[in-house]
């Protein structure tokens, strides 16, 4: 009999503790939701006019290099090792610096993807240069495809307002 009484008392205490824990959880969640609602005063993150102007200046150089892709394709198809390397080390040399500067000016949420794409393009340019140095025709063709794709991919992270 005592065991049944203790068992019933234990069941009631357990049920009461569960209800108390549930009530505490509801209170914490309610406070958290009220604190995180933003009150309607939050603004969407946008680039300043100064940042857009600076990005546009750097993007101009990037797009000038991108516009040289048909010329680069002609050199790759002709397996012109010397002029392929000259184009990479000449007019396309500043692309890495321009992307780095653009990436620093982008919104923080966009920077990781921009950095990843910039790294991929720089790696593709290095692979293209190495293939030309080694006079590897197949490697040159494959690397050019990655370079062209890299330019297109990185161009997507440049804000439309900065594309002039």
Image: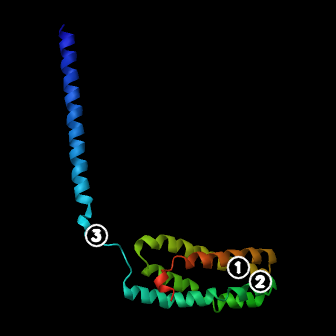
Instruction: Report the front residue among 118 and 70.
Output: 70
Residue that label 3 marks: 42
The residues bearing labels 2 and 3 have C-alpha atoms spaced at a distance of 51 Å
**Image location of residue 7, percent across then percent down:** 22, 16
Q: Is residue 134 visible?
A: yes
Q: Which numbered tag is attached to residue 76? A: 2
**Residue at label 1?**
128
Q: Are marks 2 and 1 in contact (CB under 8 Å)?
A: yes
Residue 81: where, in percent of width, then height?
A: 78, 86
Residue 4: image location, x then y, percent: 21, 11
Q: Which mark is residue 31?
A: none
Task: Say which residue appears at 71% left-offset and 86% top-offset.
Answer: 70
Q: In which quarter of the view is residue 25 placed?
A: top left
Q: Confirm whether residue 94 shows in the render.
A: no
Q: Nearer the viewer, mark 2 or mark 1?
A: 2
Mark sitting earlier along the chain (2/3)? 3
- Rendered residue at 71%/78% (across/down): 144
Tell me the crowding category of disc 1: few under 14, some 14 to 19, or many 20 or more residues within 10 angstroms, Cα based: many
Relative to 156, is 20 above or below?
Answer: above
């Amino acid at each position: 009999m005592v065991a049944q009484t203790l068992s019933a008392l234990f069941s009631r205490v357990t049920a009461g503790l569960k209800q108390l824990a549930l009530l505490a959880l509801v209170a914490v969640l309610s406070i958290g939701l009220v604190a995180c609602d933003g009150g309607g005063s939050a603004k969407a993150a946008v680039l300043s006019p100064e940042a857009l102007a600076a990005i546009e200046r750097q993007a101009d150089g990037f797009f000038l290099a991108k516009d040289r892709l048909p010329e680069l394709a002609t050199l790759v198809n002709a397996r012109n090792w010397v002029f392929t390397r000259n184009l990479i080390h000449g007019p396309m040399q500043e692309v890495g610096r321009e992307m780095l500067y653009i990436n620093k000016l982008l919104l923080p949420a966009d920077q990781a993807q921009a950095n990843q794409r910039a790294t991929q393009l720089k790696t593709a340019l290095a692979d293209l240069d190495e293939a030309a140095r080694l006079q590897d025709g197949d490697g040159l063709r494959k690397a050019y495809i990655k370079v062209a794709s890299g330019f297109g991919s990185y161009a997507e992270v440049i804000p439309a307002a900065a594309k002039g």
